[in-house]
């Protein structure tokens, strides 16, 4: 006989709707010490990425001179990194969803080691193809590692209960400052590029591999079996979701298919695509500084490579300060206001740097530029991660836009630099910053049930008296499912909200003997059932009299 789950059973399942991660069997961060450890280790990984990026970028003038590259040639070679990132990031979301963040972290760590070896061998041997291959693999490594890093940092932010995502990007900026100083020191001491890059790659590989156990929690693959006596967690995707009574093969396949489908469906979401344009603008602003700022200072103001590295370090330091202060700014003024102010600051800084008559005044523009470029990426990542179980797919989509920016910027800026100089070519980024200001409203926090559930902190006290464990009121109600025989029927949000609300009320009332519903036996439509509910209450007694007769 087909079985309809009782309201009480639905009520018991509310425990699993708070973002999916808080009570999942693989959640090891319920212990505050484990949460703090994961936070600090992940901050270290972000800082390491900054060191790796800036230590390579600070030596671009040496690489250019060793291979006798023109600005246009250098732009084409740098394009290899964007191609590698774009090729990888389109598949990074499904890859993380299928194999988990630990595999993604491990693969990216190995790729980093290979990339920095090739980056050093290219200039040392005079081989442009080796350099291009190293840049390509480096782009792959960054893209594959960025998805689990950002998803895990967003998960830690949800558990902490306040905005801390900019702190992770601030750690990246701190690492970038350190890396730029290391690059400047190596350039001043004439340390061979091969020695610097091989040492950096070796340290990075070991560090990232050692950090995996402490940092990867939200992007683990869904392979842990659920005890038979506990209902399987509800996938709070915001739409109709499938849930089953036991965690058998059918339920695991259903949950895995739902997550893979969510990772791919993010490409059809208008909000995600518009957030991607915001990330694209931010990537153009920050990425153009990474690639061209030191060269613009060296060529535009006739300075040494060490001075160019220091100016780039100033840009990164300004980003670091703003990212550390940005957590309170976002909490106080909101994402939209902060993103608009960031765009205006970037526009002012770019114009000042591009047209300043002296290096000192241009340095003020660099500081403003760094302030403006600091928060756009973490704000966009946070907006893409509003719904936890769709975060990996959406982060991979917006990261793809970042790769598109990296794909287009090097050759275009290289051609512009040939015509007007690198310093004036950077002013073209102003157009992208205007677009970022116009699209700022797209980062408004979602109000879907899954997003509200992720942002709602769990109360310290236990459940209300009379309610079963895990039953709580609140806006976090999400879609659930009713199991009828072998069929899994998903409810839409409104129907699910009503069902769960009824389940709460039913769970808080004294137990009564329940009679099988007519709708469960006969398949009567919901409208007919509601019509029968409005009839006089004497009908059940008539039915009993007829039965006794």
Image (cartoon, grey):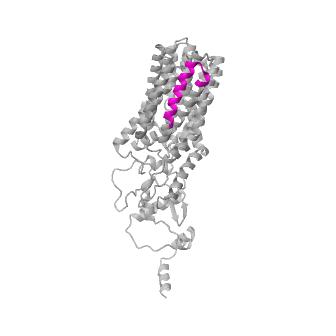
Magenta segment, prevailing SS (helix, strand or loop): helix
Count of numbered circles on the image: 0
In which quadrant of the rendered view does residue 402 lie? top right
Q: Residue at x 48, y 79 (%)?
A: 540
Residue at position x 51%, y 49% in the image: 448
Q: Quadrant of residue 527?
A: bottom right
Nearer to us in this view, 248 or 341:
248
Q: Judge by depth and name the residue closer to the eye, 228 or 245.
A: 228
Residue that appears at 55% across and 40% down: 92
Camera sees residue 127: yes
Task: Give the x, y percent position of residue 13.
Answer: 44, 58
Instruction: State which region is magenta.
Output: 107-130
Q: Is residue 247 above or below residue 42?
A: below
Q: Position of residue 216 (x, y in %)?
A: 44, 41
From the top left corner, tell me how far across and down residue 194 is, in percent. Answer: 51, 20
Q: Is 479 above or below relative to 416?
A: below
Residue 414 in magenta stretch: no
Q: Position of residue 523 (x, y in %)?
A: 56, 71
Horizontally, is 297 left or right of 17 in the view? right
Viewer-closest of 296 and 460:
296
Check residue 126 for magenta coloring.
yes
Residue that extends furthest to the bottom in the rendered view of this protein:
549
């Amino acid at each position: 006989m087909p079985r309809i789950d009782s309201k009480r059973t639905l009520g018991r399942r509310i425990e699993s709707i708070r973002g999916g991660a808080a009570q999942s069997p693989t959640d090891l961060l319920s212990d505050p010490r484990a949460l703090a450890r994961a936070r600090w280790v992940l901050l270290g990984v972000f800082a390491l990425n900054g060191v790796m990026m800036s230590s390579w970028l600070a030596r671009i003038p040496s690489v250019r001179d060793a291979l006798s590259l023109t600005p246009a040639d250098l732009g084409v070679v740098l394009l290899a990194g964007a191609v590698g990132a774009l090729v990888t990031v389109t598949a990074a979301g499904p890859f993380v969803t299928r194999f988990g963040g630990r595999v993604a972290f491990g693969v990216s760590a190995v790729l980093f080691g290979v990339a920095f070896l090739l980056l050093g061998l290219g200039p040392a041997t005079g081989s442009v193809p080796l350099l291009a291959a190293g840049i390509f693999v480096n782009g792959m490594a960054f893209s594959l590692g960025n998805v689990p890093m950002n998803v895990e940092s967003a998960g830690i932010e949800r558990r902490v209960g306040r905005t801390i995502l900019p702190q992770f990007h601030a750690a990246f900026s701190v690492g970038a400052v350190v890396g730029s100083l290391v690059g400047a020191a190596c350039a001043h001491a004439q340390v061979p590029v091969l020695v610097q890059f091989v040492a950096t790659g070796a340290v990075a590989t070991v560090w990232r591999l050692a950090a995996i156990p402490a940092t990867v929690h939200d992007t683990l693959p869904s392979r842990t079996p659920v005890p038979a006596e506990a209902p399987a967690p509800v996938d709070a995707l915001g739409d109709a979701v499938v849930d089953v009574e036991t965690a058998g093969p059918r339920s695991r396949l259903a949950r895995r298919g739902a997550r893979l489908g969510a990772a791919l469906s993010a490409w059809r979401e208008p909000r995600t695509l518009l957030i991607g344009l915001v990330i694209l603008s931010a990537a153009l602003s920050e990425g153009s500084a990474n690639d061209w700022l030191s060269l613009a200072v060296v060529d535009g103001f006739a300075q040494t490579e060490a001075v160019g590295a220091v100016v780039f370090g100033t840009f990164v330091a300004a980003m670091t300060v703003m990212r550390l202060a940005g957590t309170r700014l976002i909490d106080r003024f909101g994402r939209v206001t902060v993103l608009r102010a960031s765009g205006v600051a970037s526009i002012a800084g770019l114009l000042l740097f591009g047209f300043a008559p002296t290096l000192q005044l241009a340095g003020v523009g660099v500081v403003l530029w760094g302030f403006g470029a600091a928060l756009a990426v973490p704000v966009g990542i946070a907006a893409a991660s509003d719904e936890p179980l769709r975060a990996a797919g959406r982060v991979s989509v917006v990261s793809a836009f970042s790769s598109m920016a990296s794909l287009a910027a090097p050759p275009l800026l290289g051609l512009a630099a040939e015509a007007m100089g690198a310093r004036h070519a950077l002013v073209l980024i102003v157009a992208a910053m205007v677009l970022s200001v116009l699209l700022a409203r797209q980062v408004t926090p979602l109000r879907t049930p899954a997003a509200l559930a992720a942002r709602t902190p769990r109360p310290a006290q236990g459940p209300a008296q009379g309610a079963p464990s895990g039953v709580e009121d609140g806006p976090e109600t999400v879609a659930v499912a009713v199991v009828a025989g072998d069929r899994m029927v998903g409810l839409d949000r409104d129907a699910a909200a009503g069902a769960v609300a009824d389940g709460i009320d039913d769970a808080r009332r004294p137990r009564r003997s329940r009679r099988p519903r007519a709708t469960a036996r006969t398949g009567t439509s919901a409208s007919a059932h509601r019509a029968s509910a409005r009839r006089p209450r004497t009908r059940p007694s008539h039915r009993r009299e007829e039965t006794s007769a």
